[in-house]
């Protein structure tokens, strides 16, 4: 059984799907805490499942590094084997990333390296792409540049709006994230090439 800390900034649908999976005693990962940079609506899922939460707002800190130091201390307090960024919308500085190297993964709604950044779904639509997808990757110091663990394609339909397409992508994300965390727990995936 591995211990997982999940960081979110938004609605937390990926978090909720992991919480549901981990209700099954045969699922090999337990969510021990959920953190955020703000009072994100998704924190309610953690409260419902009686999982510890913490909020560390960058507004309280003079620099990004000082913020990240306190965020890291909150994460490490729970001694996780794995930290999942599931819609965490702040770029994490090097002091955070290097302390968790090989244990920190992100889920992103595109087939990286295509459409990096915070508006990947909108960017894919605007580019006229006919397919996009989901990527789960290790986090490095760049934005959506870390080593790719797994990807899954999602087709783009002519009538798709950003909201419709994002919902379709999220359905795939929920399954892919749960299966990837499971494989990490069973050590079935290659470790990060350090
Ligand atoms: C997901 O699409 C994820 O890939 C991206 O942010 C979104 C988070 O959605 N990084 P939710 O908060 O899990 O519903």
Image (tube, rainbow, N blue to C red):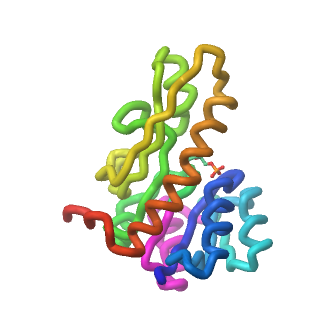
**Residue in the foreground of this view, choosing between 113 and 182:** 182
Name the image quarter holding residue 116: top left
Residue 63 visible in rendering = no
Q: Residue at x 62, y 36 (%)?
A: 168
- Which stretch did the figure color magenta? 61-84
Residue 62 falls inside the magenta stretch: yes
Residue 183 place in picture, x, y as percent: 40, 67
Q: Residue at x 55, y 33 (%)?
A: 119
Residue 67 visible in rendering = yes
Q: Residue at x 37, y 57 (%)?
A: 139
Residue 47 falls inside the magenta stretch: no
**Residue in the foreground of this view, choosing between 35 and 114:** 114
**Residue in the foreground of this view, choosing between 155 and 41:** 155
Residue 46 place in picture, x, y as percent: 72, 70
Query: Is residue 9 found left or right of 156 in the rendered image?
Result: right
Residue 144 place in picture, x, y as percent: 39, 45
Q: Residue at x 68, y 79 (%)?
A: 52
Residue 18 place in picture, x, y as percent: 61, 64
């Amino acid at each position: 059984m591995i211990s997982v800390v999940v960081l979110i900034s938004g609605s937390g649908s990926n978090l909720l799907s992991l919480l549901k999976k981990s209700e099954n005693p045969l699922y090999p990962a337990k969510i021990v805490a959920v953190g955020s940079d703000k009072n994100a609506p998704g924190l309610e899922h953690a409260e419902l499942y009686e999982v510890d939460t913490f909020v560390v707002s960058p507004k309280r800190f003079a620099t990004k590094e000082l913020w990240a130091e306190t965020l890291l201390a909150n994460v490490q307090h729970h001694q996780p084997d794995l930290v999942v960024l599931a819609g965490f919308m702040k770029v994490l500085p090097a002091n955070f990333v290097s302390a968790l190297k090989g244990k920190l993964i992100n889920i992103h709604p595109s087939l990286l390296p295509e459409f990096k950044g915070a508006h990947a779904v909108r960017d894919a639509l605007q580019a006229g792409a006919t397919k996009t997808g989901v990527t789960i990757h290790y986090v490095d110091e760049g934005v959506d540049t870390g080593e790719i663990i797994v990807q899954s394609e999602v087709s783009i339909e002519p009538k798709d709006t950003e909201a419709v397409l994002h919902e379709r992508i999220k359905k795939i994300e929920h399954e892919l994230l749960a299966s990837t965390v499971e494989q990490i727990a069973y050590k079935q995936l290659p470790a990060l090439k350090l």
